[in-house]
Image (spheres, grey):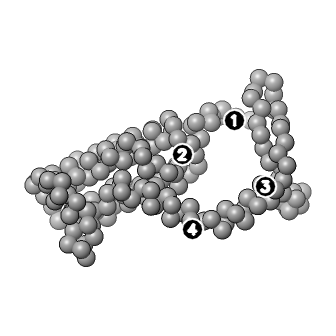
């Protein structure tokens, strides 16, 4: 069998890192690079089309899964992504914006803004909303596991011992 050994700090699930560290940094850098590339291409489109695509398909829209799955609200790359969004917007409309004008542009359209979502201001609420909406499912899924005693399992002598929870009896009956 071909198993790939992965460091704990490099674990990810469906593209979202499980721990803060190198994998989160690499994921954020990848998003920044993709966004830079997209902005270069958006500049070749007519302004109205580019603005609609920028607002609806890039920035926070591209990161929504990651923002909901991992508490990355203090990651420095979020500020970089917001800066890229601002510079891309300024390049498309061919007009620089001061901080006050940029704050107004980030307002919803119904409030007189352009509806551009700022990733940094959205990150904490996206994660908290996701955690709150799945709380009942998390509680039900983990209830049997958390009630079971913790055991120690040593797979090989050259590996670090791992603490694991035994499988719930209902799951063992399904498997067996």
Residue on which the image places disc 4: 133
So how many labels did they put on this image?
A: 4
- Foreground disc of the pair 4, 1: 4
Identify the mark nearer the N-term, 3 or 1.
1
In the rendered image, which quarter is residue 175 located in? bottom right
Q: Position of residue 164 (x, y in %)?
A: 78, 44
What residue is drawn where x is 56% and y is 51%?
Answer: 14
Left or right position of 163 against 23: right
Secondary structure of the residue carrying numbered label 2: strand
Identify the mark nearer the N-term, 4 or 1.
1
Q: Name the mark on residue 145.
A: 3
Residue on which the image places disc 2: 17
Identify the mark nearer the N-term, 4 or 2.
2
Q: Position of residue 161 (x, y in %)?
A: 77, 32
Q: How dense is the environment of label 2, judged by Cα within 10 Å: few (below 14), some, or many (20 and up)? A: many
User: In terms of depth relative to the viewer, which is nearer, 50 or 20?
Assistant: 20
User: In terms of depth relative to the viewer, which is nearer, 104 or 5?
Assistant: 104
Secondary structure of the residue carrying numbered label 3: helix
- 168 in relation to 31, above or below: below
Asked whether residue 161 appears in the rendered view, the answer is: yes
The answer to whether mark 4 and mark 1 are in CB contact below 8 A is no
User: In terms of depth relative to the viewer, which is nearer, 79 or 45?
Assistant: 79
Identify the mark nearer the N-term, 3 or 2.
2
Left or right position of 48 against 136: left
- Foreground disc of the pair 3, 1: 3
- Foreground disc of the pair 3, 2: 3
Q: CA distance from mark 3 to mark 2?
A: 23 Å
Q: CA distance from mark 4 to mark 1?
A: 35 Å
Q: How dense is the environment of label 4, judged by Cα within 10 Å: few (below 14), some, or many (20 and up)? A: few
The answer to whether mark 4 and mark 2 are in CB contact below 8 A is no
Residue on which the image places disc 1: 3
Q: How dense is the environment of label 3, judged by Cα within 10 Å: few (below 14), some, or many (20 and up)? A: some
């Amino acid at each position: 069998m071909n198993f790939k050994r992965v460091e704990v700090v490099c674990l990810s699930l469906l593209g979202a890192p499980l721990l803060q560290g190198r994998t989160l940094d690499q994921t954020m850098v990848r998003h920044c690079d993709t966004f830079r590339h997209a902005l270069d291409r958006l500049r070749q489109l007519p302004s109205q089309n580019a603005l609609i695509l920028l607002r609806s398909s890039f920035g926070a829209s591209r990161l929504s899964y990651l923002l909901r799955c991992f508490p990355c609200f203090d990651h420095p790359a979020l500020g970089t992504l917001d800066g890229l969004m601002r510079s891309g917007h300024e390049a498309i409309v061919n007009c620089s914006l001061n901080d006050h004008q940029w704050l107004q542009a980030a307002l919803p359209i119904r409030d007189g803004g352009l509806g551009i979502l700022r990733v940094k201001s959205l990150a904490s609420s996206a994660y908290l909303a996701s955690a709150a909406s799945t709380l009942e499912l998390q509680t039900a899924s983990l209830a049997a596991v958390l009630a079971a005693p913790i055991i120690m399992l040593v797979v090989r002598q050259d590996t670090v011992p791992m603490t694991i929870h035994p499988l719930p009896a209902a799951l063992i009956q399904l498997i067996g």
